[in-house]
Image (cartoon, helix red, strand yellow):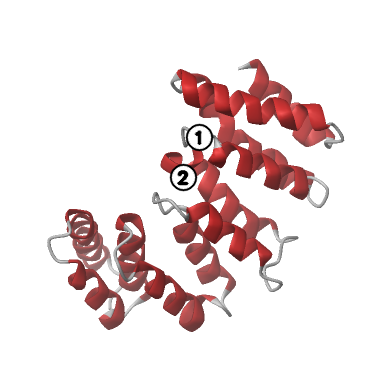
Amino acid sequence: YSPDAASAGKRALANAALGYVAVAEDDPARVGERFHTARNMTDRLAALSASAQAWTDDAATMLADFHANFAATNPLVLDKWLAVTAAVPADGVIERIRAVLADPNFPKTNPNRLRSLVGAFAMGNPTQFARADGAGFRFVVEIVAEIDRINPQVAARLLTGFRIWPMLEKTRRDAAKAALTGLAAGGGLSRNSADILSRMLAS
């Protein structure tokens, strides 16, 4: 491993190619091999992300392995793991995020952890956030209502993920508006969140 520009460029190219391999399913075992034999965090995280994005057969195992061996005791690496977990475009991601949030060891009062998990979902996973059934919208609104009582600034930030809703097709647009309207009807929001919510609904 070397941090120089040329070496970093080679790693970036190789890891981009690995992502295509994972999606194409030409050789999914190669992604797992890359993950387990990586000699630096850049390559290991890239292999994990490639597997998670393609949701290969061993993606769940790789996520668990990475968390147990690298993320559990390192906040910065944990943030990476949370973001990879939240960005999975396959069904089941909301349930996995709920499980992370329900873990008594997850620090719900930590802004960085919340942004890395729920923020990554709302702003980096359009496939699942903007699901036609509205489950992604309802999930984020639910979390915003809960977090607003703890950290209004983070809750307001999470709401900005809804800035895409006016540009969606009608089914998804209606689902997003229903979720936002329901949040507004509940009342009791902080000034931060209420301000962002009113802006989202006025879009």
Point out residue 75 in the picture as x, y percentages from the top left corner: 59, 71
Residue 92 versus residue 139 in the image, above or below: below
Kindly indicate the quadrant of the structure image that contains residue 14: bottom left
Q: Please indicate whether residue 11 sits to the left or right of residue 191 in the image.
A: left
Residue type indicated by callout 1: Asp
Q: Residue furthest left?
A: 26
Residue 75's place in the image compared with 202, above or below, is below
Q: Quadrant of the N terminus?
A: bottom left
Looking at the picture, does residue 141 appear above or below residue 102? above
Q: Position of residue 15 (x, y in %)?
A: 24, 62
The percent coordinates of residue 136 (x first, y second) are 54, 41
Q: Residue furthest top?
A: 202
Residue 133: assigned label: 1
- Whether residue 66 sits left or right of residue 98 in the image: it is left
Relative vertical location of residue 150 with respect to residue 166 in this rendering, above or below: below
Label 2 element class? helix
Residue at image coords 71%, 38%:
156
Q: Amino acid at mark 2?
A: Gly
* Residue bearing mark 2: 124
Q: Disc 1 and disc 2: Cα gap in Å?
A: 18 Å
